[in-house]
Image: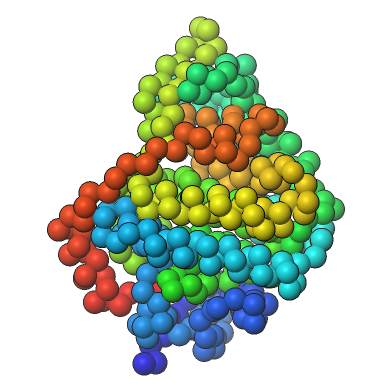
């Protein structure tokens, strides 16, 4: 079958896409690049359609959703996440080297952190966040006591941005390898095939891991379908609604006492739990060792990249008050240097799927028969 998948991109994006594909084509399992066409205002990059030709069945996000809904077990999720992690470890073994941030692909973090960039614009001191219906400026938030599940914390967004900026200066040195650069649920197909190469090349391993961790923890089954539904509809094949999402079991905000008290339950379905458990297990082994390059502080390596993803992908001012509180709770954990990866994931609660509703089964069958492009 000669089915094709065509990406319409700006000339700059197309150049990065084809350069990235060539950088990793002998390192990762990737679709065949069939060619590209140059137009005055846009370019098209043409790949084989890995779904139409039967090479792949689902995306990682679909595998997770199918397991969450009880339509499959978690085995494909575990295989895919473990396989993606193995690719990262293998690339470090074959192509890994310590390199300055400036010598790696920085498009997903450096522009957001740059002075005057997105994070400065979104979180200026007088910017307002809605926390449970209470309007609090970024500057005032630093004076609040933030109680998360009974633990007292502080959160200074301006400070945590500055700390991340200092950690990710252009001369800072990191373990790098040849990777796809944006390992998220729409970018890894099952059986394991990597898609989307705009950010591929020599990437910082900790940045890749942080991207995957936050997508599994916050973006894929919660923030993207809720706040970027068009992206969710466009990037996944089955587009099943989330089974369960993180919730604030209680939230009290007192301006008078400068106190925010939130009970955070990071609820996930069994498929998402399988993905997070697999990634966590990998981080306890060779993948974590490669990220830290021998240091014991894994979360310290991931922290600046996680902060950039949590703050810099979806503006927290656009979230409803409960969701804002949940993201702030995660940021407060990250700002506490005593927090480890286990503590960051300690509030995970697994909720069972819905045993495969007829609506979901019908939607999956239609999606499979339509052979949507990747």
The image position of residue 36, as x and y in percent, is 54, 86
Residue at (61% x, 25% y) in the render = 155
Residue 157 visible here: yes
Q: Is residue 8 above or below residue 143?
A: below
Residue at (27% x, 48% y) in the render = 353
Residue at (42% x, 45% y) in the render = 223
Colouring used for the render: rainbow
As drawn, which residue projects farthest toward the bottom?
1
The image position of residue 25, as x and y in percent, is 62, 81
Q: Is residue 143 above or below residue 57?
A: above
**Nearer to me, 155 or 265:** 265
Residue 191 relative to residue 291: left or right:
left
Residue at (66% x, 65% y) in the render = 89
As drawn, which residue projects farthest toward the right?
171
Q: Is residue 82 above or below residue 207?
A: below
**Nearer to me, 159 or 291:** 291
Residue 133 visible here: no
Residue 119 relative to residue 369: left or right:
right
Residue 76 relative to residue 201: left or right:
left
The image position of residue 130, as x and y in percent, is 45, 27
Where, quadrant-wise, is the C terminus in this rendering?
bottom left
User: How many numbered marks, from 0 up?
Assistant: 0
Where, quadrant-wise, is the N terminus in this rendering?
bottom left
Q: Is residue 191 above or below residue 324?
A: below
As drawn, which residue projects farthest toward the top?
256
The image position of residue 51, as x and y in percent, is 37, 79
């Amino acid at each position: 079958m000669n089915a094709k998948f065509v990406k319409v991109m700006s000339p700059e994006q197309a150049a990065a896409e084809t350069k990235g594909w060539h950088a990793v084509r002998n390192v990762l399992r990737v679709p065949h690049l069939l060619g590209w066409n140059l137009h005055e205002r846009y370019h098209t990059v043409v790949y084989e359609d890995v779904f139409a030709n039967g090479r792949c069945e689902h995306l990682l996000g679909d595998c997770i959703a199918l397991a969450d809904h009880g339509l499959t077990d978690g085995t494909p999720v575990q295989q895919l996440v473990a396989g993606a992690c193995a690719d990262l470890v293998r690339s470090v073994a074959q192509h890994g080297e310590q390199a300055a941030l400036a010598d790696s692909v920085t498009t997903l973090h450096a522009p957001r952190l740059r002075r005057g960039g997105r994070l400065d614009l979104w979180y200026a001191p007088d910017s307002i966040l809605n926390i449970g219906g209470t309007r609090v400026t970024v500057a005032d938030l630093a004076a609040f006591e933030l109680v998360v599940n009974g633990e007292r914390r502080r959160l200074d967004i301006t400070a945590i941005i500055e700390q991340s900026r200092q950690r990710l200066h252009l001369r800072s040195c990191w373990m790098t390898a040849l990777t796809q650069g944006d390992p998220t649920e729409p970018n890894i197909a099952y059986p394991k095939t990597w898609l989307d190469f705009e950010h591929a090349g020599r990437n910082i391993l900790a940045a890749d891991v942080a991207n995957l961790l936050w997508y599994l923890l916050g973006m894929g089954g919660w923030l993207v379908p809720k706040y970027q539904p068009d992206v969710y509809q466009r990037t996944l094949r089955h587009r099943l609604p989330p089974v369960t999402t993180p919730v604030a079991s209680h939230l009290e905000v007192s301006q008078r006492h400068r106190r925010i008290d939130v009970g955070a339950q990071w609820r996930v379905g069994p498929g998402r739990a399988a993905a997070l458990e697999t990634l966590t297990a990998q981080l306890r082994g060779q993948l974590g060792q490669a990220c830290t390059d021998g240091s014991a502080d894994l979360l310290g390596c991931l922290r600046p990249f996680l902060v950039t993803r949590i703050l810099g992908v979806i503006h927290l001012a656009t979230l409803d008050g409960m969701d804002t509180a949940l993201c702030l709770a995660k940021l407060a954990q990250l700002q506490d240097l005593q927090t480890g990866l286990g503590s960051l994931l300690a509030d995970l609660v697994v909720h069972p799927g819905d045993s495969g509703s007829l609506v979901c089964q019908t939607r999956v069958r239609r999606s499979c028969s339509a052979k949507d492009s990747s």
